[in-house]
Amino acid sequence: MGCIFCGIISGDIPSQKIYETETVLAFKDIDPKAPFHAVIIPKAHIKSAMEITGENSPVIAEIFEAAAKIATDENLAGGFRLVNNCGADGGQTVDHFHIHMLAGRVLAWPPG
Ligand code: AMP
Ligand code: ZN
């Protein structure tokens, strides 16, 4: 079975891209949980946060750098939340590492 996010990277699956570098891609979430909801992913297929190693971790830093740039581009001056769901208990449904970027309303904490 193919990976949905690898399909988005290759262009086989359509998406609303908002930010792209050689190593990172961000696009709008298809089922938004906030007025602004993007997903930021490494172009390399890293399965989950459990698969992060010293070798592949530079791209994780680039994802946070992307979030800061997106916040500026999208005028998210009120702030935002970055979330990673890992594994079944963490609520991960797509097995390609991703960071959710949520903004546009006051977000409850703890999230439940
Ligand atoms: P998670 O449940 O943390 O693994 O997050 C997966 C996210 O991917 C969910 O918020 C989905 O709405 C989103 N998603 C799934 N398929 C697509 C797609 N084709 N385009 C954009 N977002 C998607
Ligand atoms: Zn993938």
Image: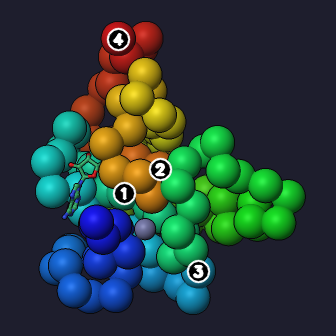
Residue 111 seen in the current view: yes
Residue located 27% across and 50% down the image? 37
- Where residue 54 sits, quadrant-wise, is bottom right
Does label 3 or label 2 sit earlier along the sequence? 3
Mark number, residue 112? 4
How far apart are the two marked residues, 4 and 3, measured between alpha carbons? 32 Å
Q: Which residue is mark 3?
A: 23
Residue located 36% across and 57% down the image? 39
- Estimate how packed mark 4 is, as few (under 14), some (14 to 19) or many (20 or more) residues with alpha carbons within 10 Å: few
Disc 1 C-beta below 8 A from ligand 1: yes
How far apart are the two marked residues, 2 and 1, measured between alpha carbons? 6 Å
How far apart are the two marked residues, 3 and 2, measured between alpha carbons? 14 Å
Q: Which residue is mark 2?
A: 99
Amino acid type indicated by mark 4: Gly
Q: Secondary structure at mark 4?
A: loop
Q: Mark 1 and 3 residues: CB-CB less than 8 Å, in contact?
A: no
Does label 4 or label 3 sit earlier along the sequence? 3
* Residue at the right extreme of this rendering: 54
Q: Secondary structure at mark 2?
A: strand
User: Residue 110: horizontal and vertical position, in percent?
Assistant: 43, 11
Q: Which residue is mark 1?
A: 39
Does label 4 or label 1 sit earlier along the sequence? 1
Q: Is residue 52 above or below residue 78?
A: below
In the drawing, does residue 11 fall left or right of residue 109? left
In the drawing, does residue 62 fall left or right of residue 67? right
Does label 2 or label 4 sit earlier along the sequence? 2
Amino acid type indicated by mark 3: Thr
